[in-house]
Amino acid sequence: MKENITQKFLETAIAISRIYGVAETLEPLPNIPQEKLTPMICDWTEEYLQSNGNMTDFLYEKIKNLK
């Protein structure tokens, strides 16, 4: 997990976590234990920050691949 957290990383990780939580209520997603969910969100955050894409499109693809 990322130890040197920047403000931008933290804000992005929180946004991704919130959107993922909404998706969990709308879609039948697999149960991911907390010890795996946190690193997954950190990885997604790093990947998103390195891209210049749209967060909604990025998360749609990530969540679609979990099903």
Image: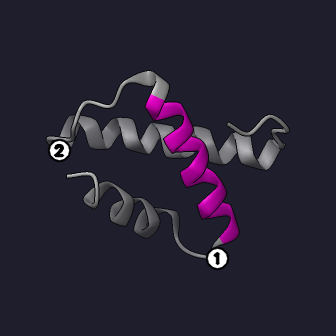
Residue at the spot of label 1: 52
In magenta stretch: residue 38: yes
Q: Amino acid at mark 2?
A: Glu
- The residue sitting at the top extreme is 34
Neighbours of disc 2 within 10 Å: few (<14), some (14-19), many (20+): few
The span picked out in magenta is 36-50
In the displayed structure, would residue 8 be above or below residue 31? below
**Residue plotted at (51% across, 63% down):** 55
The disc labelled 1 sits on which kind of residue?
Asn
Quadrant of res 32 = top left
Residue in the image at 42% along x and 59% along y: 59
- The numbered mark, 2 or 1, whose residue comes first in the sequence reads 2
Q: Nearer the viewer, residue 58 or 2?
A: 2
Q: Which mark is residue 27?
A: 2
The figure's colour scheme reads: one colour
Left or right of residue 4, residue 42 in this image: left
Between residue 7 and residue 66, name the one nearer to us. 66
Q: Which is nearer the eye, 18 or 6? A: 6
Q: Residue 4 in magenta?
A: no
Q: Is residue 9 left or right of residue 38?
A: right
Report the Cα–Cα distance between label 2 and label 1: 26 Å
Residue found at x 61% / y 52%: 45
Say few, some or many: other residues with alpha carbon within 10 Å of mark 1 (under 14 / 14 to 19 / 20 or more).
Answer: few
